[in-house]
Image (tube, grey):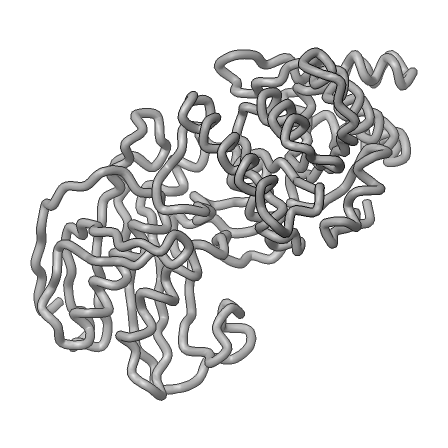
Amino acid sequence: MVSAISSSAGSSGFTLPVWVAASARAATEILGGKVFNPKQKLFDLDHNKSLIVPVSSAVLLSCNQKAMAISHCESALPLDITRNLEVWTFVQLQQKPLSGTEKLGLSTDSWLQIVGGFGVGKVDLTNQISISKYAVDLLKYNLRSLVPNGFCLKVEVIFPKGTELAQRTSNQAFGVVEGLALIGTQAHPEVSASPEQLEAALDQIRLKCASSNFSGTLALVVGENGFDLAIRLGFSIDSLVKVGNWIGPALVEAAKRGVKELLLFGYHGKLIKLAGGIFHTHNHLADARIEILTSLAVQEEIASNLLKEINQSDSVEAAWCILAKYDSLIANDLWRRMAVTIENKSFSYITRYGDFSMSIGVALFDRSRKLRWAGQNGLKQLPLFGASLDEV
């Protein structure tokens, strides 16, 4: 350890990718011989604005061959799981191109390697870092000018308390293990149950429907995981609106704005609430998922011994695993019934507010982030978004 400088600058709240990018930039700057800057200026390419982000400390390591910086998440949301989270980034310049297995894949000149260290979530099926395109783009744009030609930059991210905090999230339900995922899609956090978040979603619907290239199709996506997965599946960002928990009002607004084909895209353990007529899906307001699933299983005439196991399951995903182990055909039939029921309930919901002809489809993904099931309308709509179901 050669040198260390620290700062305690303050800030309004940012999402986790911003704190990681600021820390990585501070470490890369001192690695290149610059004086430590405790107030990092980042450019948020997606939103065309500058951000001033505090970094707590930076240090040169290993005879000036590596550097480390630390930032502390200062979320404006009191219940944010990342509030006060310590973020460590280690950076190292390497005078060789990265191989295909080393690079993340979003830079054509192989100059950046992003590694998930301790406490950072990994996708269970691939063991690769769980990171959103927004987080990658933020790092690429704000680090590229600091990397000399002919060199590549290795950035290792560590969350010392990430593994512990991940136990309080739904990461594992989405196939993310070992820590917190870097899946933010914007600079500032949202409260998914707040009126402000609802108004933001409604504004997005109005904007997209008023666009000159609006085709009449729209996908409402629930949560960060759903939004990130939709982008990875090839959905056009122009067709996507992230709605959080305010699904009911978003459906009505879309119908009022002339949407003809609307797809609800989300995790089965969240959207199942709509099958029970619950159109604000935050857990603090209502949670009857197992009861709804049991009711659907009764309609599907599933054997009584399995009904008991479903009713005693800890989660919708656990119930799926029980049924799939017993008979995958029965399990898939039940989840397809769920999707069709959500479609029907959603259409009934919007008819309370007007005479609309909007077709509502549903597509559901599982904990391994595979798009598995769709309702009758959803199956017809998925090709409009360039997507298709995975093999179950």
Q: State the residue at coordinates (86%, 34%).
A: 376
Could one spot residue 226 in this view of the protein? no
Does 106 sit above or below residue 128? below
**In the rendered view of the protein, which quadrant contains the N terminus?**
bottom left
Q: State the residue at coordinates (35%, 41%).
A: 188
Q: Position of residue 211 (x, y in %)?
A: 58, 46
Q: In the rendered image, which quarter is residue 269 located in?
A: top right
- Camera-side residue of 95 and 11: 11
- Camera-side residue of 379 and 124: 379
Q: State the residue at coordinates (79%, 27%).
A: 357
Does 152 sit above or below residue 2? below
Q: Is residue 347 left or right of residue 223?
A: right
Q: Position of residue 301 (x, y in %)?
A: 92, 16
Q: Position of residue 148 (x, y in %)?
A: 29, 83
Q: State the residue at coordinates (49%, 73%).
A: 102
Q: Position of residue 271 (x, y in %)?
A: 66, 27
Count of residue discs? 0
Does 257 sit above or below residue 41? above
Could one spot residue 6 in this view of the protein? yes
**In the rendered view of the protein, which quadrant contains the C terminus?**
top right
Q: Is residue 349 left or right of residue 21?
A: right
Q: Is residue 21 left or right of residue 190?
A: left
Q: Is residue 89 left or right of residue 209?
A: left
- Camera-side residue of 83 and 211: 211
